[in-house]
Image (spheres, helix red, strand yellow):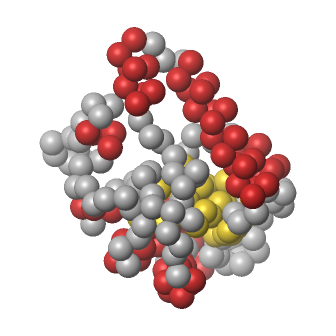
Amino acid sequence: MRWRRDVRRFRTDPVPEDVLARCLETLSLAPSVGLSEPWRILRVLSPSSRAACLANFRDCNARALDGLDGAKAATYSRLKLSGMAEAPIQLAVFCDDTTTKGSGLGAATMPETRAYSVVGAITLLWLALRAEGLGLGWVSILDPDRLARDLDVPPGWRFIGYLCIGWPEKDDMVPELEREGWESRSPALHLETR
């Protein structure tokens, strides 16, 4: 679990389809509000789709850098924030906010729990991938509306994350953001009682 890290540096070696299938099966084991199973997974394979997603990232990343200055900008410019150019497997993950599965149980009062369910499923996938020696990088520097248009998804699908999957270049127990001085890990869990 400690090495579960957000991987951004991938080897380009292919991932065997049976290994990927085994890991993807963990999604169906995830709990979901009302048993709605709202996750919708797109495997991004075509060169044109990958190019559109990568261009989206590069545009958003450039805007993020433009919003910084001084030491923070210098640190940010050194960070590798996406494995989209190298990762052999790329998935765009969405939440179907219009699903009728589960009959709205739990989601009627808290509709955001559908998205939480998708995040929980991604966490199971992340751990299953790690157990196989694979890494996952979750790219969040993207324009969700542009991505949805580029991938032609139904209007009821909400973008949750773009996942890069592959063999990590190396194992490292320290997150890159911490290694590069972007942020430090909290020394203790913040826990309050009432």
Task: Report x, y in % for residue 92.
Answer: 65, 60
- Determine which quarter of the picture holds residue 169: bottom left
Residue closer to the observer: 42 or 13: 13
In the rendered image of this protein, does residue 128 appear above or below residue 162? below
In the displayed structure, 76 sits above or below 49; it is above
Left or right? Give the position of 58 relative to 31.
right
Q: Does residue 116 appear in the picture of this structure?
A: no
Q: Residue at x 43, y 19 (%)?
A: 73
Image quadrant occupied by the N terminus: bottom left
In the displayed structure image, the side of residue 130 where residue 174 appears, left or right: left
Q: Which one is nearer the viewer's eye here, 150 or 97? A: 150
Q: Taking the image as drawn, is residue 153 in sight? A: yes
Taking the spot 16% from the left edge, 45% from the top edge, the residue there is 188
Vertical placement of residue 93 versus 33, above or below: above
Q: Residue at x 54, y 55 (%)?
A: 86
Camera-side residue: 73 or 191?
Answer: 73
Give the x, y percent position of residue 173.
Answer: 22, 55
- Name above or below for residue 59 compared with residue 119: above
Q: Quadrant of residue 35?
A: bottom right
Q: Position of residue 175 (x, y in %)?
A: 30, 47
How many marks on residues? 0
Is 133 on the left or on the right of 13, as rendered? left
Residue closest to the far left: 187
Residue at coordinates 40% horizontally, 20% vertically from top-left? Answer: 74
Query: Residue 135: x and y, percent?
Result: 41, 64
